[in-house]
Each structure stands twice: as C-alpha cells, then as structure tokens.
Image (tube, rainbow, N blue to C red):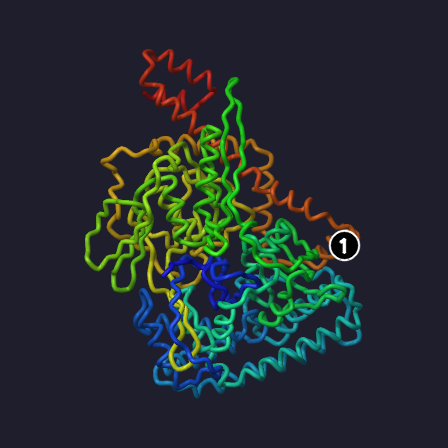
Amino acid sequence: MNIRDRRAINIFLKTTKDNHSIFKKVVNGKGAFYFSSFLLILLLIVLLPVSSSVAENIKCSRLPLLMDSFLSYHYAIRDMTEDIRTHAVDQMIKKLDSSKTLFYESDVERLRPVLQKVFENMQTGNCALLKPVYNIIVARARENEIIVKKILESDYRIDETTELNIDVKKRRYAKTMSEKHALLEKFVQFQIENDLLSGIDLAEAKKQQIHRYELQTTRIIKRNPEKLVEYVAEAFAEALDPHTSYLTPENFDELKIQMQLSLEGIGALLSSDNGFIVVEELIPGGSAERSGLLKPKDKIIAVAQKKERPVNVIDMDLHDAVKMIRGKKGTQVTLTILRQLERTYRFDVTILRDRVYIKDQEAKIAYETRMIKERQYCFGVIDLPSFYGDEKEKKSSYEDVKKLLAEAQIRHVDGIVLDLSRNGGGLVEEAVRIAGLFLGNGVIVATKNNREKLMIFVNGSAKINIKDRKNKVITFPAEDSQSVYTGPLVVLTSRLSASASEIVAGALKDYHRAVIIGSDHTFGKGTVQTLSPLPKDLGGMKVTTAMYFLPGGKSTQKIGVEADVRLPGFFNLEEVGETKLEYTLPSQVITPLIDISGNSTPLWRPVERSMLADLAAKSHFRIAKDAKFAEIIKNNKEAARKKGVIRLADLRKEKDKKGGDKKKEKATKLKQKIRNQYAPFISESVNILLDMVIMDMVQASLGAMLTRERCLAYCTLHDNYSCLKFVSDN
C-alpha cells in the first residue's frame, strides 16, 4: 500500500485552524494524489467495504459506536477525559456561531453546562438536551434578521469610516442588544459596500442583504435537533487533535465519487472562516497557481460566471460557494478577492477552469552566478513545488530532480539551492528517494503507531540502531553513486514547507548534509492520519494514528525543522503552523535511528556548527543593508499591525485608484510581480551558498598552507570576513 500525505485524495476535511472550525474542500484535482493541503503530513488510505446506499443523518443512538471507533484508533487519546469534553464544547459553540454575531455572552454561559452534559451523555446515546440548544439558535437567528431589516430601513446610508475587525479571536460576544446591533451594522456595511463595488445599486444591495439573512434563518431552522447530532460528532472528533475529523455520510459518499472522477475547477483548497471563503493553498499545476494571481489567505467575497453579475458569497455555505467556483474545463470564473497585507486590497481575478497538469508542477532548475575577485561561481537553484508522481503519466519528481542534478554536475556548478519554500508536501516515496540523491544510502524517516510499532523508510542498506521484530523496514533501491550529489547544499524553507518537505529538510539536517534557510521553522506537522469508512453507514473518519520521526529520533510535530540561518518571513505567516492550531499533540522523541556522530566518513563535507554561526552573521549583515528586505520587513510589520481590520474607505480608495477596475494588468506582468517578491529570498540563498563554498575552500586549503601570512592573504583575496576570523582564531 502506498503511503501518501495530503495529496493522496480529493476530500472534504473538517479541521480546526487558527482557532476556527473550518470546512475545507478541494476545488480541483486529478487522480488520487493531487490533493494538496499543508495541514496533512501523511495519509494512510484504508478503504474498507462500504454499503452503496446513501445513509441518513447520524442518529444519537450511534454516537457511542462513533466515539469508540475514534478512541480505539487514535494515536494518543484513548478515553473521553474532562479536557476532551471541554474542547468539544468549545468546538460546538464555534460551529453554532463561528462569527460571534449570533449569541450573547449570557447565551454562551448558559450553553456551556448544557453542552457539557450533551458530551457526557454521548457515551449513552442521549441527546435530549440538544432541543434547548436548538431553540436558542433559532431565536437568535430570527432576532438577527429583525435587527438587519431595521438597519436597512429607508434612511440607511453607507458610512465609509466604518472599521470591521474580522479576526474573531479579537472580538468578544455582545453583552446587550445595542452591542449586537452595532456589530451587525458593521457587517452589513461591509457586505453592502462589497455589492456596490461590484456594480449593484444601493436598493438592490439592500434587498439582497435582507434576503441573505432570511436564508440564514431558514438554514438554521433546518438544523433541527437531529441535524445537530452531526455537529456533536464533528465537535468531538475535532476535540481530539486538529487533524482528526468526522465525515458525514453525504461527505464520505462524495469522497468516493471524487476518488473515481477528475474534478475540473480553479485548483485551490478553500475553507470557510468567520463567514469568509478563504484560499488555504494553491494546488501546484492548477489554474489558480498557474495564473500567479492568488495567494494563500486571500478571501473570496464574490463569484461571477462569464457575462453575469457577481454573487456575494460572504456568509454563504462553503458547499454552495464551491459549486459556483467549480465548473467545466475551459469556462471562466471571476473571483472578487479581499487581500490583507500592509493595506487592504479588493480586486477581481478571472481564472480559466482547467485540470491540474503535472507538467506545471515539474521541478525546474535555474542558474545564478557570482563574481569574486575575477573568479565566477555558478550555482544551480532547483525549484521543487511538490513531491509529485504518477505511474500512468510516467512522471516522478525523483526522476526529474535526478536529471536536473546530472545536468548541474555537467555544468560543474559550485553548489545547489533546493527550494522547498512553497512546497506543501506530496508523495512520501518520492521524498525518501529525493533525499537519497543527496545522502546516498541511509534511513530517511520512520512512523510510530499507537502500538509502538515503527515503520522505517530506508534508501539502500543502512545500519539501524533500533532492533525489534515488530518494527518494519521499507527499503528503496540503493542510489547509483554517480547520481548522488555531494557538493555544497542549501535548502530554502518557510512556514509553508510541510509534510514531505519537512521529511527531506529534516533528514538533510540530521545528517549534517545541508544548511537549512528559512524564516524560523517549517510548518511542524508530524502526525499521520488514517482515512476509513465507519460501520453501519455512519460516514467516515479521518483519525490521527501515528507520528513520524527523523533519523535523529526527533519528530517535527509542532517544532518543524528549525532554520540554521534565518531570513525575514515570506509575507506575514506568523499565524501559519502547527503551533497555531488548537489541541495539537506534543512532540516526541525516540531512540535515534542512526548514529549521528558518524563513525564512517560521509561522501560530502559535513556542515559544522561553527560554520552555521558565521553564515548567519554574514547573512544578517547583508539583509540589514538590503533595501528589498527592508521593504519586506516593513510591510510584514504593517500587515501584522492591521491584521483583521477592514476599512470601508480603503476599499473605495483602492477601487478609485485602479480607475474603477477598468485598467487591468496583464497576467504575465502580475506573475512577474509575484516572482519579484520571492527573488530576494532566492538571491540571499545563493549568497549564503557562496559563503559556504568559500569557507569550505578556505578550510580545505589551510592544511596545505605553511604560514599564517599566506592564510591571511588568501582570505583577503576572497574578501571573506569569516575566513579572516577563522585564521585569527586558529
């Protein structure tokens, strides 16, 4: 059975991120491995026989069976503890009112003990207490509808000074009706402004807004107490850890359909967060990624089909919004995007729906040169967007990287930069073999299940410290020595580097093979999920069943792979990472799988700790003087300061500035802008690699030099401060 990460399959995911309950969905995908979300590291696909009939909603009487199924398979949690119940109550409240616009503070205080009893009774299949919960949410929905209709009376006017904080963590529940009225008025102002900027007149915008709240009331009324049982199941699963989730029978049935069919759309993973449709990740090779126009964390606030008016999707059910965005290959869809950086941007993006093409994901190499004292150094920069592979199309990221390395060695490059900074993962087999192209034989990664059994992935032959019959070793073919690249190596990472990227970067770091460069650390997801159907047509479950470990014995869970040399962050990614999720499992360690001290001489020159300190010092000095990095740091600080705040006046100014959206930049120019934003990070990676090469040359040459004077002359010739310091200290 192939072991794959989150690309294993297109799937609905219920998960918890940034302290919100979000409903994730792939809007494009081809085949079984294109599913791309940096929230999953590995996914074991376990598909058992399932009834073909469509099941009804889960019954309360089946909750004990559901709970037992999750607790039996979970990696770390086996009992319904007080903490789990508390977490489940929190998740349930978020599901009922994710934007904090429905409940009063007093409602939440009243609901907590009731919901606590609901989860206590879950073990016996008693859900009678969901009736009063249902009554409260229906009453509040009707109240909100009345308030909005009053706000939009005939004398309503847009107030462009309005500021709306869309970061729910920074907002409390209303205590009084006047507080709720003020909050809803801000939401209505923003939604009306969005309609006006889309070309709808005020009268029509008011009419549509009232209709939205009427529909919201209708949807909530349809959440009868029986329907709320689904929320109980979902909240319980999400309380175990951020990556465990319950799939309703409807969602699991669609999963099985998606396993057999290729979907066509824009190629993006979307979520619903606080009423907004959020772009979580762009699938490599998809239309959205190829356009160069969208970024992770963009909010989709309206959707328009060709030659049709935009439809406001704020507060729309994610499933309905996705239906509008997804469509046939060759058709166009226009998305209205809200982007929050150093200021708030609102703009339209037109995307041609298409399939995901592996060719657009392929690893690529570019060459950069540096001139030092009349000597030109040449470096290869390998951009690897994902660890892809498809037997039918005869595509393999391992084979592609192998060819690129062969080409680079023919050109006699002085070093390689492996760019994983935007790589969210892929096929584990491909990652293990790619690591072998830089390491040769050796252990790359291991997983441990809840029975303490290890599954160890090895290239060729390797001495493994842990000896136990219950452990399993999966061996890949030994790499031809001529295919192994042994020269200087730098790996560029970011908070977006996840799953298989962390396996490769972590293994190279443990073997002292490469210098890891990045903002601080990688995403930090070190757990394995198993997807399987539940018995008796209960739907499906995705449950955390294992944790993975690097050759040195550490897991990347929560901590990720720490950068040896830190660069300013890509955009503002402080909220990205496992540590930002709720109920994350703690990191663990096992006995090292290899002898890190290394009795044998490796094929490459090991990266020494003293070198890392010097590389970091030189990089810091360069960045401090670099105008492009100064601008990046400034914009990141401004984005962090304004995080979550939308000003209506800013949206209007941005539209006026662009001439009413009449002047649109060409896609090629916009793509170039995106490339220019990443250029400083690539350039500095090459600079660090140059420093590394010079330092290696200096250390190799010192043994052949007879006098201190000759050493100093050599260092001065190469204008190398680290070299001079090394000679002075020795």
- The spot of residue 584 in percent (x, y) is 39, 61
- Secondary structure found at label 1: loop
- The spot of residue 273 in percent (x, y) is 56, 65
Foreground pick, 604 / 348: 604
For the point 62% across and 78% down, the residue is 216
For the point 55% across and 64% down, the residue is 262
**Could you say which quadrant of the image residue 353 lies in?**
bottom right
Foreground pick, 105 / 214: 214
- The spot of residue 445 in percent (x, y) is 33, 50
Foreground pick, 580 / 419: 419
Residue underneath mark 1 = 661
Amino acid type at image mark 1:
Asp
- The spot of residue 154 in percent (x, y) is 79, 75
* Left-right relation of 479 to 156: left
Q: Is any part of residue 519 visible from this angle?
A: no
* Left-right relation of 545 to 675: left
Q: Would you call the spot at circle 1 few (<14 residues within 10 Å), some (14-19), or many (20 or more)?
A: some
* Left-right relation of 475 to 650: left
**Could you say which quadrant of the image residue 543 lies in?**
bottom left
Above or below, comparing residue 115 to residue 377 in the picture:
below
Foreground pick, 4 / 272: 4
